[in-house]
Every structure is written in structure tokens, then in C-alpha cells.
């Protein structure tokens, strides 16, 4: 029956470079999670965030998503988000204006999918519009994989917006339209940094350093097969107790430095705002010692660079298991930081 045992539940499907994460959930209040699964993918099925072998991705989807409707997403490597202001006009005039505006900031060649949301903050003679552009080839490849699996795809969302939806459901962002926070997705092939201001993603950057590089560093340092190195990484992480500490610590510090560069760039251009929290998601966030290392590094740099005083609690690892409740725990459903995006996708309801 797949993951659609409950009527009205969506399956949120996060297709990553190492595997597919699926969550079936129904919105609340409170939201309810019915099932979750992680299925590995063959190496090379997804490259640079784009499905290059739809057939290889469709195979694991067949067992997990055979009924009901699914929602998936593209990442920041394949999408651009801009908050734009226009004189007040009709929606037809706006769509024409957006076609011209989009050409100014799209960094890729080839066809593009465009979507937009008129924000309620618009007033007077101006309107604020959230414009999203995605590479059509990335969207088409996802659609082909779901079609090959016989699944009904309801929407292609953005990973960052799905993660934000999950943060709201978890109560970590009580008011999504206020404040400034960062979302750091520590994935297998890359790390994605997105900064939200007033509920809108205003900075998005992909860093080509992910969990896979840590695994390869452990394998090289200990002369171990990558399967064993992966287990060691999950057990020891970047702690001083790790037998590969000398190999993984420089990687972790380089990762922290790259994340800081993204945050610093935004704060320099927005000196009047304060970065309130940095939320960690993704499989690489589960490495022992990684949240503590990023907490120490980022809080120290904030103090040094902006004179805001060292403070604890800047970095917040996200644990979606809080939504399971007793029934979910008794059913043996496993949720962790890897499933934040797929949880948010499962909670999609047309927005």
C-alpha cells in the first residue's frame, strides 16, 4: 500500500544525491505523521541536485509512493527566489512584467519555469511579489521519475520553503513573517544556506562540501572501505575521540567558514537586522560534534565581527521526531534531521 495508508495524507518526497526520503503526513493542528522511509539511490542517479537517471529514481519510488498524491522539490542549485516590488497592476500585467524581470537574475541558460506569489504585505501604490524561477530540465527530470513510478505528482516545491513549513509546524518559527533566521541543510553532496527575512528567502547559496566528503576523508585516513567509513563517521563524527579526527576536523572548519561567509555577506548588507537563529537540517547535521562545532564557530564570529557579544543558542539542530507523538513512536516511525524537507513537503497544501 506504500505510504498512503491514511486518507488525505500527502507524501513528501525529497530526492537527494544519496537517497530518497519520504514522509506521509496530514496537517493539523497538530500535524500527524503516518509513515517515513529513506531509500538509498544508486551512485550517479542524481548529480548536482538534478535527476540524471529518472528510471533509477523511479524504482525506489514505486514501493514507497504507489497511491495518493506526492509533492517533491528542487533545491537552491536549480532555483532562484527574488522579492520584487512593482507599481500596483493587474495580474495579467504583472505576469508580463515578471517575464522581463526574471531575465535579469537567472544564472543559467535554457528554459525556465516561473511562479509567483503576491504577498499580503503589499499596500498603497506598490505590490510585493515573491518570484521563483527553476530550471525546466530539473523540474522535467523529477516529473519523469514520478511518472515512471506511477505516482501522482501534485506539485514541485522549493526545498527551502518546504523546510520552513516544517519549522513552523514544529513551533520553531512561531511567526514566519517576523525576524531573520538561517536554514543550513547539511546534505550528502552539498550544503545549502538560506536566509529568511520576514518569512521570505532573501539569500540562497550552495556550498560544494557535504557529508560524502567527510566519509571519503575517513576512508582515506583509516584505509577503510567507504561503507565502513560511513559507519565510523556516524559513530564518531568530528569529535576529538574520532580515530580520523585529524582528517575530518579541517573539513568541518572549512564548512563552518563557508557557512559564515554566507551569513556575514547578508549581515554586512543589512546592518540593522540581527540574525536570531541558525537551524541545522540534513544527514550531515547528525554527525556527532558537528552542531557544537558550528555553534562555537558562528557565535564567536558574530561576536568578533559585529560586536554583539558571544551568546549560546545560535545554532539549533532540528529534530522533527517531536511531531510523532506516542502513536508514532509506538509504530516505530523514525524521523530525524534528514526528513525535515520531506516533512514540509508532506504538509504542503497549495501554498
Image (spheres, rainbow, N blue to C red):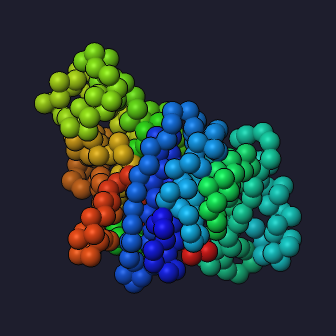
Q: Position of residue 333 (x, y in %)?
A: 31, 64
Extreme residue in the front direction:
1
Depth check: 87 or 68 in front? 68
User: Horizontally, is 15 left or right of 51 in the view?
Assistant: left
Q: Disc count in the image?
A: 0
Q: What residue is rendered at 66% in x and 77% in y? A: 122
Q: Position of residue 256 (x, y in %)?
A: 35, 37
User: Horizontally, is 4 left or right of 212 in the view?
Assistant: right
Quarter placement of the C terminus: bottom right
Q: What residue is rendered at 78% in x and 39% in y? A: 109
Depth check: 264 or 130 in front? 130
Q: What residue is rendered at 67% in x and 80% in y? A: 123
Q: Position of residue 267 (x, y in %)?
A: 45, 49
Q: What residue is rendered at 73% in x and 40% in y? A: 108
Extreme residue in the left direction:
241
Q: Is residue 164 above or below residue 18?
A: below
Query: Is residue 274 something that shows in the picture?
Result: no
User: Horizontally, is 267 left or right of 58 in the view?
Assistant: left
Q: Is residue 258 above or below residue 175?
A: above
Extreme residue in the bottom direction:
29
Query: Is residue 60 something that shows in the picture?
Result: yes
- Place residue 121 in its image quadrant: bottom right
Q: Is residue 70 above or below residue 108?
A: below
- Place residue 276 in its image quadrant: bottom left
Q: Position of residue 183 (x, y in %)?
A: 43, 54
Amino acid at each position: 500500500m506504500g505510504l498512503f495508508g491514511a486518507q488525505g495524507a500527502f507524501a513528501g518526497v525529497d530526492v537527494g544525491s544519496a537517497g530518497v526520503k519520504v514522509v506521509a503526513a496530514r496537517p493539523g493542528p497538530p500535524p500527524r505523521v503516518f509513515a517515513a522511509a529513506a531509500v538509498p539511490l544508486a551512485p550517479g542517479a542524481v548529480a548536482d541536485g538534478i535527476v540524471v537517471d529518472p528510471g533509477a529514481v523511479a524504482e525506489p519510488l514505486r514501493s514507497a509512493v504507489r497511491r495518493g498524491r506526492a509533492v517533491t522539490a528542487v533545491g537552491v542549485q536549480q532555483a532562484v527566489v527574488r522579492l520584487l516590488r512593482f507599481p500596483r497592476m493587474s495580474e495579467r500585467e504583472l505576469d508580463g512584467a515578471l517575464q522581463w524581470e526574471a531575465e535579469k537574475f537567472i544564472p543559467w541558460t535554457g528554459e525556465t519555469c516561473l511562479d509567483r506569489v503576491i504577498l499580503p504585505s503589499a499596500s498603497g501604490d506598490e505590490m510585493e511579489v515573491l518570484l521563483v524561477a527553476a530550471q525546466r530540465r530539473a523540474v522535467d527530470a523529477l516529473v519523469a521519475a514520478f511518472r515512471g513510478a506511477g505516482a501522482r505528482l501534485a506539485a514541485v516545491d522549493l526545498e527551502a520553503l518546504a523546510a520552513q513549513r516544517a519549522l513552523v509546524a514544529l513551533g520553531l518559527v512561531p511567526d514566519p513573517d517576523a525576524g531573520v533566521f538561517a536554514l543550513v541543510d547539511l546534505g550528502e553532496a552539498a550544503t545549502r544556506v538560506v536566509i529568511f527575512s520576514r518569512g521570505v528567502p532573501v539569500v540562497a547559496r550552495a556550498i560544494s562540501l557535504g557529508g560524502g566528503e567527510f566519509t571519503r576523508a575517513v576512508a582515506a585516513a583509516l584505509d577503510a572501505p567507504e561503507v565502513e567509513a560511513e559507519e565510523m563517521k556516524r559513530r564518531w563524527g568530528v569529535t576529538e575521540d574520532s580515530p580520523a579526527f585529524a582528517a575530518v576536523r579541517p573539513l568541518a572548519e572549512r564548512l563552518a567558514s563557508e557557512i559564515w561567509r554566507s551569513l556575514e555577506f547578508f549581515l554586512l548588507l543589512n546592518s540593522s537586522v540581527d540574525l536570531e537563529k541558525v537551524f541545522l537540517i540534513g544527514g550531515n547535521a547528525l554527525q556527532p560534534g558537528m552542531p557544537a562545532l558550528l555553534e562555537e564557530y558562528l557565535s564567536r564570529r558574530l561576536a568578533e565581527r559585529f560586536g554583539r557579544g558571544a551568546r549560546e543558542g545560535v545554532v539549533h539542530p532540528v529534530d522533527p521526531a517531536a511531531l510523532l507523538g506516542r502513536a508514532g513512536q509506538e509504530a516505530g516511525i523514525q524521523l530525524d534531521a534528514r526528513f525535515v524537507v520531506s516533512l514540509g513537503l508532506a504538509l504542503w497544501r497549495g501554498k
